[in-house]
Image (tube, rainbow, N blue to C red):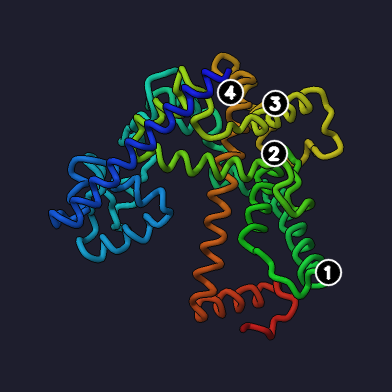
Amino acid sequence: MVIFAALKMGWVLAVMWFLTAITLLFVILRLYTKVCIIGATEWTNLWRLYHVSRGSFHLVLERLHDKYGPVVRIGPNVVDVDAPEAVKTVFNTKGDWKKTEVGSKLPVVYNLFSQTDPQKHAAEKRPIAKYYSMNGVQPLEPHMDTVIKELCHQLETRFMDGPDAKGTCALGQWILFYTWDVVGKVTFSQTIGYLGHGRDFDGTLGVAEQALDYFSWVGCIPVLDHFLAKNPYIKGLGPPGLGNIGAMSVQRLVARYQGLDKDTHDPEQADFLDKFIDAKNANPGTVDDAQIVSWLMINLIAGADTTAISIRSTIYFSLRNPRIWRRLRDELAAAGLTKDSSDTN
């Protein structure tokens, strides 16, 4: 074990020294040869990896588009497009654009997120696509309403009427608690419990954040995944696993089959798990329980963080623009959704 640990540490140090050398090379080029750093994107993705790792890439892109226009090259084979009129073309759902392989060719568990084969992706998506349409999602609103009320209750009792009334509410964190709980509620009629606990009680949110950071880095240079998460010789170089999400999905599926979730599940108020089981019954030759577990995990992992980002951004930019905030308050007041309709400040 000591020898293995030493080898592992030596390998990690070698990678660190390599990246350090590359960084120094860029510094030298920048200081002494006056090479414009954006020019490096013609032959390497290291420039992009550097800014992504700093968490400021969105600001860098904004400056680049202000300077160079709607299309900017950010890697040897990567361009960033800032053109609203191109959204429908770039993000169409017809399968015109093929996903690139992220990571090595080593065995990987494919799902709707990682599957790169258009035919296989379409086959996996087809049985459940209708459940994510507007008509498919609207019946889930009662589940969402329940969690919205819980969020309001927690904020009011903790930060308005409770012992923390004079303290600061980390609203962004509470929105994250809400989105994970609401995704759990619409997926299998049970919240995960973050709102009730008021914290990341099982460590899942921290693990998910680390995983997203890792994906953003290896997304810049996919071959790194071959040496890190999928390294066949040295384990533990990638992000922590989301095994608890998989275990939770399996437990909820088994409980549904055995009727052990009657206290939380109302058959008259269907959730995604009900719909996935219906998809299995309608497609017995292509959908099995493993596929259902995969769908459940994708719902949780891919739905919560992105929803939190959208809600946070909406609140942030609305507050930054008083006119928009007043308009929002007026619309809520007109719909009778505010306690004091006269307060529009």
Q: Indicate whether 93 appears above or below 148.
A: above
C-alpha gap between disc 2 and disc 1: 34 Å
Looking at the rendered image, the quarter that the N terminus falls into is: top right
- Name the residue located 70 percent from the left edge and 48 percent from the top edge: 200
Across and down, in percent, residue 253 comes to: 72, 27
Q: Amino acid at mark 2?
A: Asp
- Mark 4 or 1 closer to N-term? 1
Crowd band around label 4 with a 10 angstrom C-alpha radius: few (<14), some (14–19), many (20+): some
- Name the residue located 83 percent from the left edge and 69 percent from the top edge: 163
Task: Assign a secondary structure to mark 3.
Answer: helix
Across and down, in percent, residue 122 comes to: 44, 28
Q: Amino acid at mark 3?
A: Val
**Relative depth, front residue between 88 and 158:** 158
* Disc on res. 268: none
Residue 115 seen in the current view: no
- Name the residue located 38 percent from the left edge and 49 percent from the top edge: 52
Task: Assign a secondary structure to mark 4.
Answer: helix
- Name the residue located 58 percent from the left edge and 41 percent from the top edge: 208
- Mark 4 or 3 closer to N-term? 3
Residue located beneath label 4 in the image: 291
Task: Assign a secondary structure to mark 2.
Answer: loop
* Disc on res. 250: 3
Residue located beneath label 1 in the image: 162
Residues at marks 3 and 2 touching, judged by CB atoms closer than 8 Å: no
Q: Quadrant of residue 19?
A: top left
Task: Assign a secondary structure to mark 1.
Answer: loop
C-alpha gap between disc 3 and disc 2: 16 Å
Residue located beneath label 2 in the image: 271
Q: Amino acid at mark 1?
A: Gly
- Mark 3 or 2 closer to N-term? 3
